[in-house]
Image (tube, rainbow, N blue to C red):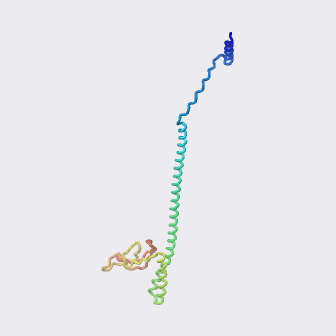
Amino acid sequence: MNEESIQQSEKDEKIEQAGGGAEQPVPEAAEPVPEQAPGAEEKKGKGKHEKLREELEEAKAAAADYKDKWMRTAAEFDNFRKRNESTRRNAYLDGKADVILKILPVGDNLERALTMCDENTAKGIEMVLRSFKKLLEDEGIEAIDPKDEEFDPAFCEAIMSEPAADGVEPGYVKEVFLKGYKRGDKVLRFAQVKVTT
């Protein structure tokens, strides 16, 4: 045997000892990793941008929702404030009206006293009566004195009636027993009158 065949047989012997005579498959060379396509990195970046864009849209929608809720709350508070202010103002005016209602009989009595007193006393009563009327005027209160006017149930209360005389139309105020008073369109006290029928 030549040297070359000796080496070959030693080699075969070693292979048999190591693997028990079975041939071991030779590992194939690993497949080369395919190079990424030129647009792959760009697509990956686009996915990230899409996610960020979606998050931005969600944040914008949430901000719009919060802004809408804030504006509604601000409007509701403003309406509450206005209602509260109006309620307070009306309560104040109603309180003043109650006090004025209590002093109206004083004015009625002064007017009655004026018709039954002497000249010197009348001058003093007239001064007091002028002050009383000025007070009412400053409060925006007007007298309702509908004598010889058509009867208006919105301002007058008919407590008596009499048949209309010839040439006089029915439904007119013949006499005022007690003057009424109003502030704007609100009647504080209805005028008590006699009406023709």
Q: Nearer the viewer, residue 27 or 166?
A: 27
Above or below 130: residue 67: above
Q: Nearer the viewer, residue 147 or 22?
A: 22
Residue 174 appears at what percent x and percent y? Answer: 37, 79
Residue in view at x 45 percent, y 83 percent: 111
In the drawing, does residue 85 fall left or right of residue 167?
Answer: right
Residue in view at x 51 percent, y 57 percent: 71
Above or below 84: residue 47: above
Residue sticking out furthest to the front: 3
Quadrant for the N terminus in the image: top right
Residue in view at x 53 percent, y 56 percent: 70
Quadrant for the C terminus in the image: bottom left
Above or below 174: residue 41: above
Residue 73 appears at what percent x and percent y? Answer: 52, 57
Q: Quadrant of residue 184?
A: bottom left
Residue sticking out furthest to the top: 1
